[in-house]
């Protein structure tokens, strides 16, 4: 209810008033325009549109998707055998005449060798890359959730700034008109100079408050512009606040934290490091390689005629006989990395639980405060202004009482706007924590 409607509901027949007091009260009646009209819906930047713009333009999401695709490709490559090696050369060529047909051992040799890593190393390497790819996908999901949360927080802050500007602009309009009527009354000898000074002083404070709110709004729009671009951030917002409901109780949200994408990132990394331990253990097994070669010979053997070609087959094995300075150390290093990943996961989960407790505590208290302001304090401040106007017009209260009452209503309206936005901010944080949209 605006101040004008509050005064219109009063009963003027009970006011044995001085005429100039009725004129000043009338100034308050006509000067209270109500909330500023909202801009056309055509240009409103809704919260859903802001989220869509931010998610569509965020390069980090594209980077994480490309990184996951890279690791998927490496998972296939790492699970394959190394490329075989082809060797071609001349062997046992005599250097006196460089005629390989005269030397029985001279030959042109072509060979093919294939290495086989120890145990299941190849399969485990592919599994490790797949786990790292899954970690990148989980990181992308966590980034999208975090981005949606940040856009919501920035959008809500801009919404509060626009609402606060409208409330303060209305109060400034009231006091400007009030000063005008008070000056007229004082110039005719009917008013009080202190009333005029008091009204001008309060208008100055309201202007300062408007400047402060405008600066905060500019900062909020800049923050929103980081996600949606300056052009979209400059658009007006719809006057209605969005519905960010918190459907799950705190205990269920805490239970869901173990599946949060941030925790899933650490789980996939732990899996990759555990596979690294398995790879290190496989290094205690021998690796081996197979070499097959064919030697072409020319010339004739005096006893057997044409010299036969030669075939060679050889298997090579590594012998990990002294593992203390190599295999043991690599295994110890792999176990340390895996342990560090477990500690990192525990830290992430603990931080998420702490954020959940804080967000739910804020959400509950802000909901209580919102109900208190809507059910009691805002109505009481309205009634206080009406009572102050009655008392002032009845010449039983001074002008300062009216000003204080109106300023109390201004503060109540700003506080309620702040509380509503802060409650929705807490809800946005809870939705992020529970992993929902």
Image (cartoon, rainbow, N blue to C red):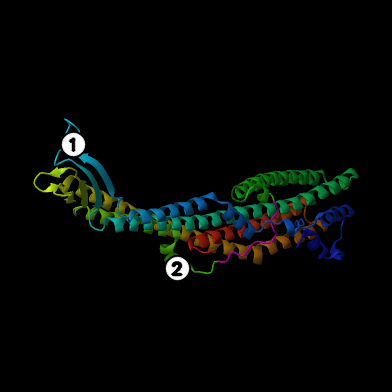
| Quadrant (top left, top right, bottom left, bottom right) of the N terminus | bottom right
| Quadrant (top left, top right, bottom left, bottom right) of the C terminus | bottom right
Eyeballing the image, is 183 above or below 125? above
- Stretch of the chain drawn in magenta: 235-245
Q: In the visual, does 436 lie left or right of 237? A: left
- In front of the other: 77 or 60: 77
Mark 2: which secondary structure? helix
Q: Residue at x 29, y 56 (%)?
A: 122
Q: Residue at x 42, y 64 (%)?
A: 259
Residue 235 x/y as whole percent = 70, 52
Residue linked to disc 2: 251
Please name the predominant secondary structure of the magenta segment in the image: loop
Q: Nearer the observer, disc 2 or disc 1?
A: 1
Q: Reply yes or no: does residue 174 show up in magenta.
A: no
Going from N to C along the chain, the mark reached first, 2 or 1, is 1
Count of labels in the image: 2
Mark carried by residue 93:
1
- In front of the other: 271 or 422: 271
Q: Residues within 10 Å of mark 2 (few under 14, many from 20)?
A: few
Q: Residues within 10 Å of mark 1 (few under 14, many from 20)?
A: some
Residue 324 x/y as whole percent = 16, 47
Residue 150 x/y as whole percent = 55, 54
Q: Residue at x 24, y 47 (%)?
A: 111
- In front of the other: 58 or 116: 116
Q: Reply yes or no: does residue 238 show up in magenta.
A: yes
Eyeballing the image, is 94 above or below 416? above
């Amino acid at each position: 209810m605006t101040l004008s409607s509050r005064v219109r509901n009063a009963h003027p027949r009970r006011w044995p008033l001085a005429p100039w007091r009725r004129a000043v009260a009338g100034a308050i009646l006509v000067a209270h325009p109500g909330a500023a009209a909202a801009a056309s819906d055509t240009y409103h930047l809704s919260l859903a549109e802001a989220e869509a713009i931010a998610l569509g333009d965020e390069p980090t999401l594209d980077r994480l998707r490309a990184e996951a695709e890279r690791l998927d490709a490496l998972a296939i490559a790492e699970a394959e055998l190394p490329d075989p090696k082809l060797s071609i050369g001349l062997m046992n060529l005599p250097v006196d005449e460089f005629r390989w047909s005269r030397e029985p051992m001279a030959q042109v040799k072509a060979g093919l060798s294939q290495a086989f890593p120890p145990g299941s190393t190849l399969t485990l390497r592919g599994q490790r890359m797949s786990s790292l790819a899954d970690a990148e996908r989980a990181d992308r999901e966590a980034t999208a959730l975090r981005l949606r949360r940040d856009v919501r927080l920035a959008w809500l802050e801009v919404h509060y700034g626009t609402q606060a500007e409208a409330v303060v602009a209305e109060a400034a309009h009231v006091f400007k008109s009030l000063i005008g009527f008070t000056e007229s009354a004082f110039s005719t000898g009917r008013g009080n100079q202190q009333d005029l000074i008091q009204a001008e002083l309060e208008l100055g404070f309201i202007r300062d408050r408007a400047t402060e709110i405008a600066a905060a709004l500019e900062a909020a729009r800049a923050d929103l512009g980081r996600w949606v671009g300056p052009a979209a951030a400059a658009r007006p917002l719809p006057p209605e606040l969005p519905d960010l409901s918190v459907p799950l109780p705190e205990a269920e949200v805490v239970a869901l934290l173990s599946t949060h994408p941030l925790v899933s990132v650490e789980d996939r990394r732990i899996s990759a490091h555990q596979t690294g331990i398995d790879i290190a253990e496989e290094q205690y097994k021998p690796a081996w390689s197979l070499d097959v070669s064919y030697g072409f010979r020319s010339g004739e053997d005096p006893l057997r005629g044409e010299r036969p070609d030669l075939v060679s087959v050889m298997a090579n094995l590594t012998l990990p006989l002294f593992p203390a300075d190599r295999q043991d150390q690599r295994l110890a290093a792999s176990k340390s990395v895996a342990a560090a990943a477990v500690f990192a996961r525990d830290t992430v989960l603990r931080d998420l639980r702490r954020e959940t407790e804080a967000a739910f505590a804020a959400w509950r208290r802000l909901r209580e405060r919102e109900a208190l302001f809507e059910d009691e304090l805002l109505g009481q401040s309205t009634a206080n202004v009406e009572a102050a106007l009655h008392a002032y017009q009845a010449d039983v209260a001074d002008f300062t009482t009216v000003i204080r009452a109106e300023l109390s209503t201004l503060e109540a309206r700003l506080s309620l706007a702040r509380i509503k936005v802060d409650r929705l901010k807490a809800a946005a944080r809870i939705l992020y924590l529970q992993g929902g949209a």
